[in-house]
Each structure stands twice: as C-alpha cells, then as structure tokens.
Image: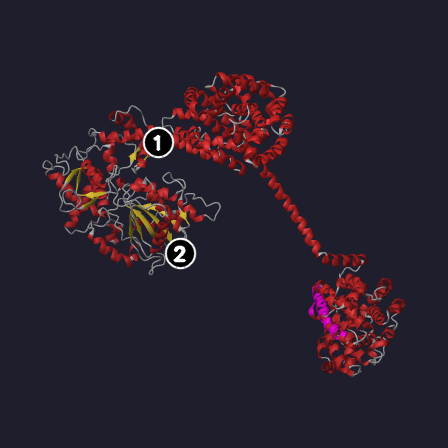
Amino acid sequence: MTTTVSEEAVLTKPIPAFYCCYLLRSAKRPSALYIGSTPDPARRLEQHNGFAKGGAKRTERNTLRPWEMVAIVEGFPSRTGALQFEWSWQHVHTTRHIGAVETDQLNRKRKNPPTDKGSGIWTSTPKVLGNLHQLLRSTYFGTWPLTVRFLSSEAHNHWQRWIERADGLLPDTIRVKLDFRAEGASVLDSNLPANDMTHIDATYGGIQEHLAKSTSLLGDNTNSLSCEVCQQQLSTQTEIIVVCSHRRCHAVFHVNCISQLFLEDEGSSGLVPILGECPACRQEVTWVELMKELSMRLHGGKNATKLLKGERKDKANTQGTKSSKGGKKPAKTGDYTLDGDYEDLDEDWMNAVNVEPSSEDGDRNAANVKGSTGRVEIVIDDSEEDGFD
Amino acid sequence: MTSRLDHTIVIPSSPEQNWARSVSPCTPTRLFGLPPMSISPPSLPSPSRLFEEIGLGQQKNPPSPKSPFSSAAGKTATSKAITENPSRNESSSKRGRPGSSEAKTAGSRKNSKSQETRNKILTGRVAKPTTVSKAKATAASKSKDTSVVKAKAGTKKSKPASQNKKDKLAEEAEAEAKEVADAEGLNLEEALKRRSDWTPPKALSLVSIDEDTPSQGSGTKLSFGDVLRDYHYNRENSSCEPAQPSKEGNPTKRRRLELVEFEVLQERKPIQQKQIKDAVKTRKTKSKPKKQLNTITARVTARYEQIGELEDLFVYNEESSCETSECLKKPTKPKKETAGKQKEPEYIILSPDAATKSLNDQNFLFGTCSQLERDDSPTFFEETQTAIQLSECLTFKKTASTITTASSAMSIATRFTGKKSHWSEAARDFNGAVVQPEIIDMTDSPTVSVALSRLSEVKHDAPKMASLVSSQSVSATNSLVPKDVVTASKPAADVQLASSGPEPNKTELAAGPFRKTASRLPEMPNFNGYTDSELKNQVLSYGFSLRAVRGRKKMIELLDKCWQSKHGNTATAAIVETSSSAAINETVSVSAARHSDTQVSDKLPTRKKKTTPSRLEPKTTSRAGKKKVSEKPLAGKADKPVEKAASPIPASTYNMVDEIEDSEEEIIPSPTRIQIQRQSSSRQTTPAISCLPLGTKSKRSLKSTKSSTYDEATLLELQSSITKAIHLQTRPRRSLGGSSYSPQLTWHEKILLYEPIILEDFAAWLNTEGFALACEDREVGVALVRTWCESRGICCTFRP
C-alpha cells in the first residue's frame, strides 16, 4: 500500500464478498483447535484437510484430520480487519484491544496459566469462545458489522455458558447466527468433515443485482438524480452516491447524508452507522450491504465489470465456461470469491466466474450437505495467500 | 534300593513326608534299623543336632544339672558318641528306638513328637546348618550324579565336612553352652549362627504338626508308624534337606527364611496345646514363647500377651533375653540381648514418654509461633506509637507548653507542610517565641538527654525516655515504647499523658534525619529512613511500578530524583497553597500529624545513625521554619500540593477521600488507636478531611496521564478536533490517475466505506490539512490517531 494519494483510489480494494475468521476443530481430537481466517471457508477447509494445497502446517497431522469448522465470525468489511481480528483472537493476551483476558478465570486452578504463544492451536473450546466474546465486546471490534455463525451445537452451548458468566452483552452490531450442521467426520469419508462449508456463500453474488441496479441508475440518467435526504442534485463524477439495496427502490443518497441520517436514527455518536431505514422504500438496510456495493462500484474495477457481465451471462442462462482446472464441479468454481489478493486474479478469472444467482445457493447447500465427497477434486488456482495466518 | 519300597510302606502312616522320602532314600534304612545304618553316617552330620538335642535334654532336666551336662554333651558330640541317649532317657526312652546310634536323631524325634515341640524345633534349627553344609555338598555332587544315589553319596561326602563342622560346633557348643547355660543351656546360638545362612525346611514343621496330633491321640504308644515317623523325621532333618534343594533347584536364602517363619508359626499351635496338657508345660511354654518371639509380630505382640500369662512373662524375662537375641539373627551380640530387651520394653512403656517427647517437640513449634508473635510485635509497636502520637496531637492543645513544643518539633520533622505551618502557628498562638527556643535547644543541644529528661519529668516515663535517648539503641526503644503504649492505652486520660511523654523523644529522633536532609535539600525527605513498605508506597505514588524498581537502593535513588524534579518544578505553586491553608491549620496539623506519625514510627529502627549529625543543624532548619513558612510547606507537601495546584482538574474532593483511605491503610488500627480516634472523632471530622493533602492515588493518576505524551484534556481535545477535521474535509481534488468514475474519497467516506485507514497517511493529512480545518494548531502523532480510530471501531493499520 505504498500508494500515493492519487493511486489510492485505484488500488483500494472493495469490501470483500466474504471474509471470516473461523474456529477449526479436529474431529478426531476435539481438544485441538485452530483459529484462522479466510475469504472462502470451503476451500480453506479443504486445505486444512489436505485435499487442496496450502493448508496450515499446524493442521497437517493426519491424526487430527479431518478438521471441521465449529464457528466462524463473518462479515469483515476488510481483509485487514479480518486479519487483525484473527491475530487478536489468537493472541488474546498480547492484543491491545482487550485488557485482562476474562477466560483466564477458567484456569484459576492453575497457577501459571499457559500463555498462548500465538501458535493458533488451542485446547479449550470454551476459552476460545470466551475470548471471542470478549473480543467482540471490545471497542475496536465491537463496532464492526460481524456475525458469529455457529456450525456446531456443542460450540454454541459453550458460547451460551460463557455468555452467562461474561460481564457484558455483545454490542448491537454483532449478530449471532445458528447454522448447525452435521458435525465430526463425514459418514461417507472419514477423512472429510461432515460439513464442508460449501453452504456458505462466499461470493459477491448477493450484491450482483444491487450493483447492476446502481450502475444502471447512475450510468444512464445521472442528471436527474437527487439525494433522497438532502434533495440536492447528485453528481456521479464528484460525489459518492449510495443506492438503496432493495430491488425496486431507486433511491440514491449522498453517502454522508444517508450515514448522517442513519446515525441520527440510531442515536449513536459514532462515525459509521450499522443499519437504517431507507427514507424512500422504508425498508431496513444494513450499512454493510450498501457499502459493499458502493465499494465494489468504486474500487471493483475489472471485478465489478466482470461481475456485471457475469450477471448478464447468468440472465442469459449461459453457464460460464469452466476454467481449465475447476471444470468438474461448476457450482463450486463459480463462486465470486474474492481471495486475499483481489487484484491478482488470473486472466481466466472470468472463466472461474460461473455466475449463479444467490437463489441457487440454497439448492447447492442442500446438495452439498451429503455430497461432500464430490468436492474433493476441486482445486482453486488462485495463489495462496492464506499463509498469512 | 529297598528303601524305596519301604517308603511306599511308610507313606500311609505319614503321608506328609512322602516328598521327603522320595528324595532321600536314606531314611528307610534308619527306620528299620537295618545295616544300612552304615549308610546312616550321612545322617551323622546331624550330630550337630546332637548337641542341641543334648541341650534339649538338658532343658528338660532341671536347670542346675544342665550346665555340666551340656558341656559333657558337647564333648560327647564331638566324638559322635551316643550321648543323645541320656537326654532321651527321660522322655523317649519308652518308645522303642531303632537303637542304633544313628537313630539317635530319630529318637530325638520321638521325644519331640510325644512331648515337646520345642525340642523338635530346636533340633530343626540345629539341623539347619548341618543340612546346609550337606546341601552344598550335594549341590556340588549333583553335577556328578543325577540319581538319588547322588544324594547319598553327597551326604557321604559331606560327612567329613560335617565332621569338621562337628568339631567346630562342638567347641562352639562348649563355649556357647557355658553362656547359654544360664539360660538353660540351649545351644541355640550356634543354631542362630548357622541359621543366619540357612533356615530349616518345611518338612520339620510339617512333621511337628503331625507329631502333635497323633501324640495326643496315641499317647505313649510305640507303634511302627511312630517309628517310621521318627525315621522320617530324622531323615528330614539330616538328609531330606539336601534333597530339597535338589528338588527345587539351588537352595536360596529366601526360601529358607520363609521356612523359618512357617516353622515358627506352626510351632505356636503345639505350644498352646501342650501348655494345657503337661505339667512340665512351664518349661515348654517358656521355650514356646521364645519361638513366638522369633517373628517380629510375635515380639511386638508378646508384650501384650504377657499380661495374660504371668508364667510366660517370667520365663520370657529370664530366658528370652538369650533367645530373642538369638532369634534376632545376630548371634554374636550377647550384649544386645539385655540392652535390646531393656530398651524395647522401656520404649514401649515409655510410650507416654514418647508422647511427652512429641509434646516437647510441639513446644518447639510453639516456640516458633512465639517468634512469630515477636515479629508481629513491631507492627503493634508502630501502631501503638502512631496511636500515641495521634492522641498527643489531639490533646495537643490541652497539654502543657513543653509538650506542645515537643509535638511541634515533631511536626517540623515530618515532611508534610501542614505540620510545619501548623507548628509555626501553634507556636505563635500558645507561647510565641518561648516555644521555639526550646525546640532549638532540643534539637541542637548536645545534651538532648537533658532536655528530654526535662520533658519526661512531666511524665512518669521520664527515666525510660532518657535512657532511651541516651542509648539510642533501637532495641531499647522497641522494648520500652510498647510498654508505655500499653500503659497509655488503658484509660483515655492516661493515654494523653503517657502518649505525650514518649512522643517528644520520637519526634526528636525523627526530626534528626529530616533536618539533616532538609538542610541540604530544603524539602527532600530522607528516603533512607523509610521502611521498605513506605518506600514502595512512595514509588507507587510516583507512578512507577514496583517491578521496574527493585531493591531498596534503587527505590531510594528514584525517589530522590523524583523529589528533586518535583521540588524544582513546584516551588511556586506550593507557596500559594500554604498561604491558603492557614485558617485550617489546626485541623491540618492533626491530619499531618497522623502522617508524620506513621512515618516516624517506620523510621525508628533506622534512625540511630542520623541523630548525631542532625543535631548540629537544627537551628538553621528551625529558623528556616520560622522565617520561611512558605518553604516549609514546600518541603513537607512537596509532591502533593504542587500537583494539586498545577492540575486544573477539579478532583480535589475525590483525592481527599483517597488520601483518607491511604492513611487508613498505612495505619492498622490498633485498639488503642481506635479509642483515640473515637475520642478525637469530633474534632477530626470534616475540616480535617478537607485539609488532607492530596493522596498518593491522585498523584499516580496524574503521573500516568502525564507519562503518556498528552494530557487527558488535550487528548480529548485533539480527538474531538480529529473528528471535526474529518467532517469538515471537503472533497479532495480528483486524483490524476483516478478513473472518471471514482471521485477521491474523503477520510470520512473512507471510514464509512470500511476502508482500513492507513494511520501514517491519516496522521499526515491531519497535521497538514485536517487540523487547519478544525482550527487546531497542534499536531498529532500516529499513536494518538490510532487510539482515536480504535476507540471508534475504525479499522486502521499502519502502512504495510
């Protein structure tokens, strides 16, 4: 990021479609835990389980495989933020975002609680979840639009237990989502986790429509647009314009105006709102989705155009051509995964984009619950930047 | 090998011995008194037993004849003579013996059978060593021959060895017999010696059992079966033993030991039975208990058993000394017998004594407790001291002028400004100039003791105090003062009087170091005089962590530096304060006195050294006190008031509360002090509190905030100005390379877009443009920007 001010706009990445920190647990030895982050949990899980290149070294041992994701924290608006959160979660004792680690109470019996050396390997699920809870309550992460998704009922039980003892409540910005899946190793293949995480949509599919709408709105008749809040004319060239995410709503706003409005509604003194009601359609919009589209529009560059093209393709019911490697399972390769290095997407990125409407995700999820073995062959060809963790 | 046939015949009569027979064919020959008796010589090794048997016979006989007899027997034994016969005459002669000299052993068996297990046992023991030798011999011979014949040959071969042994044994027997003669002439010691290497086989014990039961039933019958038994018995003793090892492999000591125990156990039963039976029992019982004692458990329990059987007791006492010692497996320690015996019973009897011993040990523990109590005492001493001083301060007005002067001196000594101002005022109020000269005398006078004595004259404690001062020994002060305190604490009125007495001394002592330091650096307290705990408190008050500063020296150095720096900075501010506090001086003095008291009390131990040099300088200091009232406060309060004045933050009340807490913490309320407090509570109330100097906590907080480059206030201002600047930012010019579609984002928009904020860039923008917009002329560092971002949940990062 050695960008000059002029270059920033170009090189700034859009908000990732999906970025999460996950808690990995060994199906064979539940005491072995791993904290990582990824923009694509399904692929990352394959890596951890040895079916794709690039798994973390700590998860290499066969005695611990398969690994399963028991909880993920998703919704990070930036890769940087996700990595920060990951690091803080791994290093709760050294992070500057929380003071005394509350979960240290748990090993009150021990005189010298083992200090985490940043190994990423943990031994106590309740402790890790307690740490997560405390992190999410911190002033820094507490305002981020994060969602904790529990994929294991057991993990959620630990979480609940911790919530009862923890001092504070999670801030409003943090949501908790229960997404219980089959746990442990897969019945069909003991080397695979029962839940391969493919049910999670890690693509920009969700904002595709939104992006298309906004581009059409702003691109065609720019002169007639006026901010719904301040009623002033909008200049697409000089101003940052937010478009309501709801399909039929064509409201557009100054980003400052709408943020101000939302903040006022919330009554918060912060800078970034969480969500608000669109003044035009009176429907609730989350700030993140607005910003996701906006950032994609602003910084997406090629990606945005490709996304739009893909949408068009999708509308035309054309299945994208398969990439050389990933052709076996189109549903999988078609994700609009924005990986760690968005700008490094290959030339055949377009090929990998097998545009699928978000509605299809549900079907895929259903199919994937049992069809986990089918994904073994898939190799994602993008460079592996998950070495970060 | 007719013997084997015989064996088969024998078996029904005494089935138990089967194994033995099969092993050693020799016995049958004996049984029938057949010529094989020539073979019997192998049994001769048993002659060693003969001695014992003789001994047994002796035992049977009344003790007096025994001794000569036994010696004779020993001699006969050497010659392999049939000396056994006489011994058997008594008991077993009735039973038909094989009549052969070799059958002697068998005869002995008979005796043992019918009459006394003891005899058997004895024989068994004696047999052991011999058998051992045989066994060894057989073991050696084994390699040559494999058949049973080997055993015979072995026994034969072993003869010479056994004979040699016989000779030795005979000699030993003689010697031992003399010794043992006292204890009935048993040759047990020999047996013990051998036994150390070897123990009799089970066969013996088994035999004994068998013998007992049939003997009861058959009485004196001489059945063929009995004869057979006898032979078996003999065989077992003599030749079976060598056979055993052949069976089981190499003989091991363990095995034998087990056998011994087994034997002993089994022998017990017959003992009991026979006790009931025979009139001769007494003897038998004697011997039996001995055997019982062989085992450790038997020994241990024997004491308790003795109570039941007086006879046994006596016998035991008489004989057991020998036997027990023998049983102890250390045959060569005759001395031990008596000693060991005595010891054991003593020990047991003395079990209460042991308890008392343990109690004594506990007493030592208690001693440590008392030591602990001593440790506590100093704190108690301090507390009492402080309490006294408090009371003195409270009663300060009431007391005589001399006392007031003393107290005032004390106040001077303490570093707190309040005291000094108060002292000066008090001086003016009460006695004016008169008071101070006295003070000067006190401090200056080389004859402090005189002044003290003058003061002390008012009080009862005068002599003590004088001695105290003169001696200047800490220990003396410690010992003396508490007494005073105790006396003082009882009645309230007494408290005042007594307390006033000791105080002046203390104050003086305390004053010494202070003035000394004061003369050099007008205000700095002598941290050397502080106790460790106080030093720690001080260090903490300056905002340092105790971890960083370890060691007394370091702490002192650090405190000195802090003091100096503070003093230099705050001189002006302090003056203002002092002037303001004039009206409340009295109450101030009280509170100040409190602090001073605690400090003084802490310093007591270390004070000695400084008293002498300090006396030279007091005049100057005192003058300074008079003239520069303003300065004194500086010296005293130095840290606290300065900060107070400097910091615009209106935390005064809060600080005062803290201060009270601190003072409370320092002084652990002793009962006396509590009393005093109650008495003085009316006075102390609000004014005192209001006048309390700022607490250490307040210092701490201030320091900590200061340590970070920004004040909280400025920090808040800066942060607010940052937000201001963000909101005020206008859209930057469009970047040159930027696409037409994307205008340049403002920082606010970046934040709204969840873009990670590059802290360096952001700080740079703030310092160049942003603060200009917000009319902020200060600059911000990256760290501050970072805290600002993080406090608002804005994702920020350093430039990667």
Label 2 sits on a secondary structure element that is loop
- Measured as percent of width and height from the top left, residue A317 is found at 15, 52
Magenta stretch: residue B259 in it?
A: yes
Q: Is residue B580 left or right of residue A279?
A: right
- Measured as percent of width and height from the top left, residue B717 is found at 30, 29
- Measured as percent of width and height from the top left, residue B497 is found at 57, 30
Picture disc at residue B304: none
Q: Which residue is mark 2?
A: A28
In space, the residues marked 2 and 1 are separated at their CA atoms by 45 Å
Q: Report the mark closest to the observer, 2 or 1.
A: 1
Give yes or no for contact between labels 2 and 1 (Cβ–Cβ under 8 Å). Answer: no
Q: Residues within 10 Å of mark 1 (few under 14, many from 20)?
A: few
| A320 versus B537 height, above or below | below
**Is residue A59 in sight in this rendering?**
no
Between residues A304 and A275, which one lies in front from this camera angle? A275
What residue span does the magenta drawing correspond to?
B248-275
Q: Amino acid at mark 1?
A: Ala
Chief SS of the magenta region: helix
Chain ID at mark 2: A
Q: Amino acid at mark 2?
A: Lys
Chain ID at mark 1: B
